Image (cartoon, helix red, strand yellow):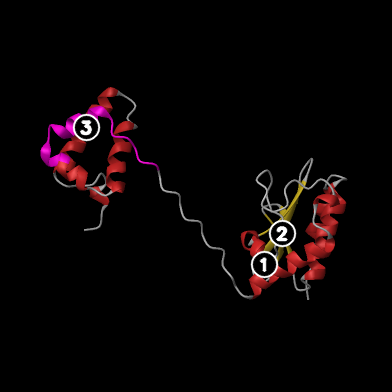
Amino acid sequence: MGKKDPRVDAYIAKAQPFAKPILTHIRKVVHAACPDVVETVKWSHPHFDYKGIFCGMSSFKEHAAFGFWKGALLKDLVPAMPLPQEEAMGQFGRIKSLADLPNEKLLTKIVIAAAKLNDENVKVPKPKPKPKPPIKVPPYFSAALKRNKKAAAAFEAFPPSHRREYLEWITEAKTQETRDRRMAQAIEWIGEGKGRNWKYEKK
């Protein structure tokens, strides 16, 4: 059996008048569609747990929000699932009235699909980090490398991550004096085939 939390009652009671029917409706649909859901409060907002973190709702001055922890996977399970909204947390954008939510039948279907994901212990794939754009080699860096053929060859052979570490270290220098000092040190280390953080690399 599910479980209600008196803190959620208190949260709804303190919400703005427009938000109270929204939060009450969401709560009712979630419990009806997933009878074993357990209420709690996380990050100061009501949440519903079901075999792990499940979904949550929030109330603000001018809008409410509702979202599923595995919302990114729901579009494939429920084609009518609204597209993610960037202007508010959750998958339903800025909810200002019950009309901004899917009808009860569809919302129930979404809750059931989300519960199935937790039943099957489906994990949300972690997004792949976007590759950083390459840093352009400054003219003064290129000139220093040209004066040291060994360093130039080593720098060219370095993996992109090693080249980036040197370029960021040097181009982020706050003063000309610091940049020149780093540049000299960099050429020495590069000539020796060392990465910028060679002191901390595992041998």
Q: Amino acid at mark 3?
A: Ser
The residue shown at (41%, 48%) is 131
Amino acid type assigned to the residue bearing label 1 in the image:
Leu
Q: Position of residue 197 (x, y in %)?
A: 27, 46
Image coordinates of residue 60 in percent, x first then y, are 76, 44
**Location of mark 1 (residue):** 77
Q: In this rendering, would 147 be left or right of 158?
A: left
Question: Circle 2 sits in a helix, a strand or a loop, which is it?
Answer: loop
Asked whether disc 1 touches disc 2, contact meaning CB atoms under 8 Å apart, the reply is yes
Give residue 168's quadrant in the image.
top left
Distance between the Cα atoms at labels 2 and 3?
53 Å
Q: Give the residue pinned by disc 3.
A: 142
Amino acid on which the number 2 mark rests in the picture: Met
* Residue under numbered circle 2: 81
Q: In this view of the protein, can residue 43 be seen by the observer?
A: yes
- Callout 2: few (<14), some (14-19), or many (20+) C-alpha neighbours within 10 Å? some
The boundaries of the magenta stretch are 133-152
Instruction: Write the residue at 25% across / 28% down.
Output: 139
Of residues 165 and 153, which is closer to you in this image?
153
Q: Classify 10 Å Cα crowding around label 3: few (below 14), some (14-19), many (20 and above).
A: few
Instruction: Locate residue 123, reporting x and y percent.
Output: 56, 67
Q: Main secondary structure of the magenta part?
A: helix
Please state if 137 lies on the left or on the right of 21 as rendered.
left
Closer to the chain start, of discs 1 and 3, is 1
